[in-house]
Image (tube, rainbow, N blue to C red):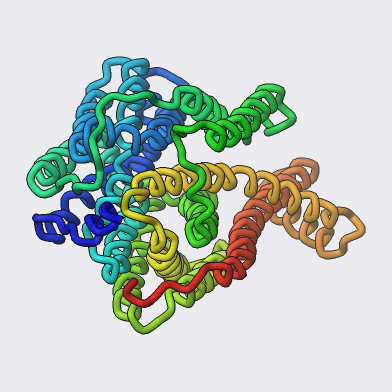
């Protein structure tokens, strides 16, 4: 009872504006690093004389490291205090970024990325918990609007900044750009962030080492599986099968152990909270689809439209415009509109954006890319803000750090699945459409025969003999078939994403209503 009164009465000494600025700089630079290095992988591979597959470990190992320490956030906060741990994470992230930028070898680069991920993984749950505790309940919508803007815009501008730096300077600056952000965040956190009185520092105490070990095995095997599944033929490969079985066994053992032990690394009892559970499910699926759409657009533009890496990254920029528009709309309607209705509207708009992309073709103008991107950005942000507010609305302040850690861990898994789904969908759907189109390329099809005849005559007029002309005509038709099957695969992928979002809509009605301003 006394602890509850302290929670209600405590208010941070610093202004909310400075607290928000401090945590959002840290959040932005962490999320930025999940995507900024992707466009520089070829350049990095060339510098270290490694293959493209080996360079993927720069991304994979970072994502694994981000998830490994994330569940131990609450334990680390109780060991040294949340502010000190936050400062340690920011410092580790910045120093590791500098090491990556100056790495003399690929091995040093990988070590730097591991420590960068360990430091960065805890930044988001810490920032989220600090914002929710610092803002009064009636302003949680505003806090989540600001937070959502950072985590939505950062992965969009990451490839743009990364492509520009790599093209105009060198890949090293992709890592060096984090340093000024980290220095600014470290200074602001030192000055304006404080630990609330109800978060007791107990010093070094026993950690759930079995839970941590199971978590590391699960996350590592799962992340490697989804990153390497497509190029290895998924479960046709014994290597991927072993990773999948290891991941599944570790996950089941982790859940069983965390529910059984008295001092769990992850307090899974938080899932008894109805709004937290279904809110997390909605957010996880939404983020998975969002990361899928962010990853699939550059592939479409580069493979079929001839865009460069920089221009394809720039094409995703309008999502940020849609995000800003959604923040303004959500902020204006949060006190007069049920948060569940906002989530429903956001999911509907997000699905419409995916359907709009599913109607693209090879004769599109730039507006056909810009407008759907704005719609996607608006829909995504309109889902994140109210849903995050709802799922944390019934979480106590003392449970906030653990709840944020659990929610972000599950969301990270969803993002990994969403990103890997791009390769799966494009490859599988391309094969399906190719088979469908090949069936129509035969002599019994009068249109096909007429086309081959016309192209053969064209090549003969260019000076080729009839045999060579016929062969060139068939090759030309086959190239068109491959192009059209790939285009159809991209469009089917977007349509599939839209259908998944539509299937999520009923889950909104399982959320319990939250008082406006509460």
Against 417, residue 516 (above or below) is below
Nearer to the camera, 492 or 305: 492
* Residue plotted at (41% across, 36% down): 71
Residue 140, position as x, y percentages in the image: 30, 65
Q: Quadrant of the C terminus?
A: bottom left
Residue at 63% x, 48% y: name it: 426
Residue closest to the far bottom:
336
Depth check: give the residue in front, 16 or 259.
259
- Relative image position of residue 138 (x, y in whole percent): 28, 71
Seen in the picture, residue 243 relative to 157 is either above or below; the reply is: above
- Residue at the spot x=64%, y=65% of the render? 503
Q: Residue furthest toward the right?
A: 444
In which quarter of the view is residue 44 placed?
Answer: top left
Judge from the rendering whether residue 307 lies leftward or rightward of residue 144; answer left or right.
right
Residue 183 in the figure: left or right of residue 78: left
Q: Position of residue 102 (x, y in %)?
A: 22, 22
Outermost front residue: 1
In the shown orientation, is residue 74 left or right of residue 6? right
């Amino acid at each position: 009872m006394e602890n509850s009164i302290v929670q209600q009465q405590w208010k941070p000494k610093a202004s909310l504006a400075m607290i928000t600025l401090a945590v959002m700089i840290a959040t932005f630079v962490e999320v930025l690093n999940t995507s900024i290095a992707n466009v520089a992988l070829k350049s990095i591979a060339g510098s270290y004389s490694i293959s493209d597959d080996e360079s993927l470990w720069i991304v994979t190992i970072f994502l694994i490291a981000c998830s490994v320490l994330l569940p131990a956030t609450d334990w680390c906060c109780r060991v040294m205090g949340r502010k000190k741990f936050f400062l340690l994470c920011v410092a580790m992230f910045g120093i590791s970024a500098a090491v990556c930028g100056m790495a003399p070898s690929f091995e040093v680069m990988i070590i730097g990325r591991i420590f960068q991920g360990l430091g960065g993984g805890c930044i988001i749950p810490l920032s989220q918990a600090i914002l929710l505790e610092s803002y009064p309940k009636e302003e949680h919508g505003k806090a989540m609007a600001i937070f959502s803007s950072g985590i939505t815009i950062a992965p969009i501008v990451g490839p743009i900044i990364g492509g520009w730096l790599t093209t105009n300077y060198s890949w090293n600056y992709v890592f060096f750009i984090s340093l000024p952000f980290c220095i600014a965040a470290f200074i602001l956190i030192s000055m304006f962030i404080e630990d609330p009185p109800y978060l007791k520092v107990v010093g070094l105490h026993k950690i759930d080492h079995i839970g941590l070990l199971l978590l590391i095995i699960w996350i590592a095997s799962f992340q490697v599986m989804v990153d390497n599944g497509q190029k290895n033929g998924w479960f046709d490969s014994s290597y991927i099968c072993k990773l999948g079985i290891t991941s599944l066994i570790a996950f089941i053992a982790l859940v069983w152990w965390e529910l059984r032990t008295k001092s769990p690394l992850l307090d899974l009892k938080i899932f008894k909270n109805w709004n937290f559970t279904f809110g997390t499910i909605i957010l996880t699926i939404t983020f998975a689809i969002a990361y899928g759409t962010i990853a699939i657009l550059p592939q479409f533009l580069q493979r079929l439209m001839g865009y460069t890496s920089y221009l394809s990254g720039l094409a995703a920029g309008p999502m940020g415009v849609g995000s800003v528009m959604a923040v303004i709309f959500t902020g204006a309607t949060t006190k007069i509109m049920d948060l569940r209705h906002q989530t429903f509207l956001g999911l509907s708009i997000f699905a419409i954006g995916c359907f709009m992309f599913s109607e693209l073709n090879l004769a599109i103008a730039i507006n056909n890319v810009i407008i759907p991107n704005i719609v996607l950005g608006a829909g995504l942000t309109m889902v994140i803000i109210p849903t995050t507010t709802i799922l944390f609305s019934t979480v106590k302040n003392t449970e906030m750090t653990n709840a944020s850690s659990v929610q972000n861990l599950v969301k990270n898994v969803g993002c990994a699945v969403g990103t890997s789904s791009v390769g799966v969908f494009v490859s599988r759907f391309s094969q399906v459409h190719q088979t469908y189109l090949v069936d129509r390329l035969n002599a019994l099809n009068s249109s096909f025969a007429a086309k081959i005849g016309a192209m053969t005559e064209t090549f003969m007029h260019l000076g080729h003999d009839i045999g060579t002309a016929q062969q060139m005509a068939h090759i030309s038709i086959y190239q068109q078939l491959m192009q059209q099957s790939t285009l159809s695969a991209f469009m089917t992928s977007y349509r599939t994403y839209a259908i998944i979002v539509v299937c999520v809509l009923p889950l909104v009605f399982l959320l319990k209503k939250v008082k406006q301003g509460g």
